[in-house]
Amino acid sequence: MGGGGDINGGGSNNLTGFDTINANTKNFDIEHPTNKEPWRLRYSVLEGPEIGVFVRGEIKDSNVIELPEVWKDLIHENSLSINLTPIGKPSIYYVEKHENNKIYIGSDSDNLHFYYTVFAERKDVDKLVVEYIRK
């Protein structure tokens, strides 16, 4: 069985060569990763008023988040949203600066251990038109 899905939500056909697909929902339906027969796994796409990307991870004993190399040509640098969550004990973390595809984190603590998520808007495509008149 293939891992892809078709527009009817169950086959193994792949969609290719599309610039835009409009749908009421956008789901991915795959074989269950633990081979839990007859179950399948369905995830859906995050929705928002932009065409965005995100990266997440964990940092320990460093104050630098290194963004994926492709992001320097993929995202608007001024569109970053950064979330930081301390691990182990309460700490204050903040963004000192963003340059050269890296985010530098400051803290009130010597405990540099945190989860992060970074969201950004893509610049390689036109901005999403959120509200428009139906044709």
Image (cartoon, rainbow, N blue to C red):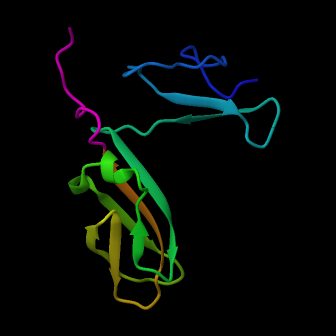
Is 16 included in the stretch rendered in magenta? Answer: no
Q: Is residue 23 left or right of residue 10?
A: left
Q: Is residue 59 above or below residue 91?
A: above
Q: How many marks?
A: 0
Q: Position of residue 135 (x, y in %)?
A: 20, 8
Q: Residue at x 46, y 80 (%)?
A: 62
Q: Position of residue 100 (x, y in %)?
A: 30, 65
Q: Quadrant of residue 80?
A: bottom left
Q: Nearer the viewer, residue 37 or 120?
A: 120
Is 129 included in the stretch rendered in magenta? Answer: yes
Q: Residue at x 39, y 46 (%)?
A: 53
- Characterize the magenta stretch by its predominant secondary structure: loop
Q: Position of residue 51 (x, y in %)?
A: 32, 38
Q: Is residue 27 above or below residue 117?
A: above
Query: Which range is magenta?
Result: 122-135
Q: Nearer the viewer, residue 99 or 52?
A: 99
Q: Position of residue 10 (x, y in %)?
A: 65, 18
Is residue 93 visible in the rendered image? The answer is no
For the N terminus, the image quarter is top right
